[in-house]
Amino acid sequence: MSNPLLVGVYQPGTSVLHRLPVGAKLGGLAVLSLTIVLVRDARAAVAFLALALALAVLGRVGLRMLARTTRAVLLVAVIAGALQWWVSGPAKAVETLLDLISLALAAIAVSATTPVNAILDALVRWISPLRRVGVDPDRVALTIGLAIQALPGTVALALETRDAARARGLGRHPRAYLTPFVIRVVARAHETGDALHARGVADD
């Protein structure tokens, strides 16, 4: 399955992570993510962060890519950490902050070393047996692919809209930011729907 609508953060290369099979990378990411969520310890959180950074270095992910893709996640992590500080104290806050950053870095390392279409092709192969019960693997993979690109795309729109509002001296006015942001998100959704319809994806 290949679709030009699906644009990820993939960076071509020859690193160890680039050469690993898609299944191994996705499986490893799933195991690491589950471990990060289940192990509740500040010292372990430091180890997870070190491991996630090592994966990014192993995949030769550029600093610009890391900065651009983790900026929004870092904001969410800081807010979550602040809430945890208020509810459970500094140790829990640090653990939450580091865990969220580790999850983001690990996901970026996999995304930057794996083409989106390769991920979708693997998903189609894995769920092909479900055709017998009426599941369309191509549509399922396309849905997942659209979700993969929707988050970074929406974050990019949010950052662009915020910067534009600040450039006009309206950074402190929520309406000057939220109104154009909502309009741009809705317009992007309509563009995606029109593109899918033009390719016959939405046809039954």
Image: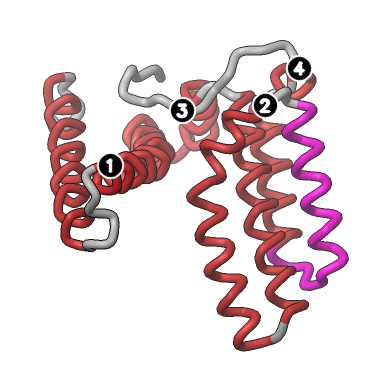
Secondary structure, mark 2, is: loop
Kindly tell me whether residue 132 is visible in this rendering: no
Q: Is 116 positioned to the left or the right of 133 in the image? A: right
Query: In the image, which disc is placed on residue 15?
Result: 4
Q: Amino acid at mark 2?
A: Val
Magenta-colored stretch includes residue 160 = no
Query: Toward which corner of the image does residue 177 lie, by quadrant?
Result: bottom left
Instruction: Give the crowd class for mark 1: few <14, some 14-19, many >=20 residues within 10 Å.
Output: few
Q: Nearer the viewer, residue 193 or 140?
A: 193
Residue placed under numbered mark 3 in the picture: 8
Provide the major secondary structure of the magenta segment.
Answer: helix
First reached walking from the N terminus: tag 3 or tag 2: 3
Q: Are marks 3 and 2 in contact (CB under 8 Å)?
A: no
Query: In the image, which disc is placed on residue 167?
Result: 1
First reached walking from the N terminus: tag 1 or tag 2: 2
Give me the residue at 35% from left, 38% from top: 153
Query: Toward which corner of the image does residue 3 lie, by quadrant?
Result: top left
Gap in Å between the C-alphas at discs 1 and 2?
30 Å
Instruction: Give the crowd class for mark 3: few <14, some 14-19, many >=20 residues within 10 Å.
Output: some
Gap in Å between the C-alphas at discs 4 and 1?
40 Å
Magenta extent: 37-58
Query: In the image, which disc is placed on residue 97?
Result: none
